[in-house]
Amino acid sequence: MLIVLRSLQGIGAAGCFSISMIVFFELIPREKYPKYGSIISADIALATLLGPLLGGIINDTTTWRWVFLIKEQIGLILVYSAPAGAVAIALIGFLLPSNFPFQGRPSMQRPRIFSKESIQRIDFLGAFLLIGANLTLVTALLEASTSYSWSSPVIIALLVVSAILWMIFVAWEWFATKDTTRMEPVFPFRFFHNRYWMGMLLQSAFVGVPFTVLVVDLPQRFQSVNNLSALDAGVRLLPYAMLAPLGSLTSNLIFMRRKAPLPILCAGASFQLVGLVLLATMPASTGSIPAAQYGYEAIAGFGVGITFGTLVTITPGSVDMRDLATATGAMIQFRQMGGAIGLTIGSSLLNSYLKRHLSPPVLTTNQLSRVLLSTAQIQTFPPQLQVVVREAFAVAYKLQLKVVTGFAAAHFPAILLMLRLVGWRELRIVGAR
């Protein structure tokens, strides 16, 4: 039941997130995008990064069920009448302009949302292929370190199916983009011809890795390695959580003065890389947390916020207006996909390392299985064995940070996609409108 309801919540959350971004671009005049873009991107970053803090409070003080009750997605409102979601719906109902976005248009000219024509324009097959390709890839990466080996027929089959689905997806989107179809493709094939836009999508995927992985793995590290409570672990993530929204606001303030996104994106990538390199070089210690780590978190978070805020702001100027809604969804999809793949790779590294270094005779098979399922099981071990297990976790998390650092470095080749050599000395942006 939990899996099914979580899936429904995910569908509702994805719809709310994407539609809110599209409404933003439809509601705000283009010349005010940088100003209000900084607010919405900072809001998204802050809401996402404060999750571990709220989760820690809930975990330490009450039942885990409140994690779902406070979510603001409509799917949970229908089931639980969640208070936060009810407030959000009330605000939308009272504050969104009447008949938006068709205000001022006669009713006979307004499209019917649930008409046969509207439904026929939905790219159901493209959405199915995209979900299937992502799901099989992430499942293969995750299960290869837990239940199966990399040479297992199950893992090989999942990877092959994922590759086939990706190829079919690209071919189908090429067909769906043709003028002879009435369909609205989920990823128009003309995106592939826009080098500027493809560079942005790649950066969105790359920024999704530290944006998501650090939010999940740092609190887990604080609990499993440093033996902190869930709330204490969330509090120690605050430097990262606070500086990400600040980076988003800063990037848009600079963009309002100088319409030069590439230097801003380079700055964001640089802050990310420096912060993550410093975090990855911290000693794998089970003792007290060095104060310098909080500064390194702040540097990495500031860079993540700069990149995320800039990408949101320049999206409307990077694609045709007919593709704005689709491009907004693609930007979000790539960030979420990057985060999911980053988490999967990180979990795979963690589990593989622990299996190699904590297998018998260090831990029994039963003890190792319990630790892989829940780090809370460490508390049940004798004190000396706890030290050995926590040290193994510390090294494994350090390996994860090195992988995340690689994704941060990948920003720079993606930024180069947004450049074209015009003369011997002049570089200019291509693709932006």
Image (cartoon, rainbow, N blue to C red):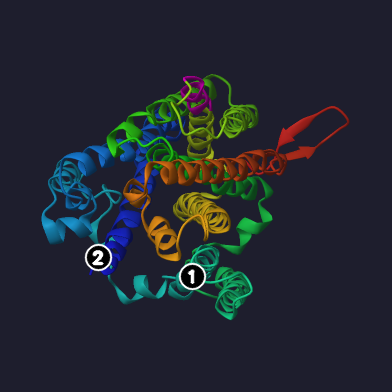
On the question of residue 244 being in view, the answer is yes
Q: Earlier in the sequence, mark 1 or mark 2?
A: 2
Vertical placement of 340 versus 262: above or below? below
Q: In what element is the residue under mark 2?
A: helix
Residue at the image point whose x is 81% and y is 29% from the top: 426
Q: Which image quarter is the N terminus in?
A: bottom left
Vertical placement of 57 versus 358: above or below? above
Q: Position of residue 414 (x, y in %)?
A: 67, 44
Q: Position of residue 385 (x, y in %)?
A: 43, 46
Vertical placement of 111 versus 124: above or below? above
Q: So how many labels did they put on this image?
A: 2
Q: Nearer the viewer, residue 148 or 419?
A: 148
What stretch of residues is rendered in magenta?
A: 291-299
Judged left or right of residue 201, residue 126 is left
Q: In what element is the residue under mark 1?
A: loop
Q: Find disc 1 in the rendering and name its residue.
A: 147
Residue at the image point whose x is 27% and y is 59% from the top: 9
Residue type, mark 2 in image:
Leu
Q: Which mark is residue 19?
A: none
Judged left or right of residue 427, residue 245 is left
Judged left or right of residue 42, residue 312 is right
Q: Position of residue 207 (x, y in %)?
A: 54, 42
Q: Which image quarter is the C terminus in?
A: top right
Q: Which mark is residue 2?
A: 2
Residue type, mark 1 in image:
Ser
Between label 1 and label 2, give the one nearer the viewer.
1
On the question of residue 28 being in view, the answer is no
Residue at the image point whose x is 65% and y is 27% from the top: 263
Magenta portion: prevailing SS class: helix
Residue 161 colored in magenta in the image: no
Q: Nearer the viewer, residue 361 or 58?
A: 361
Judged left or right of residue 429, residue 373 is left
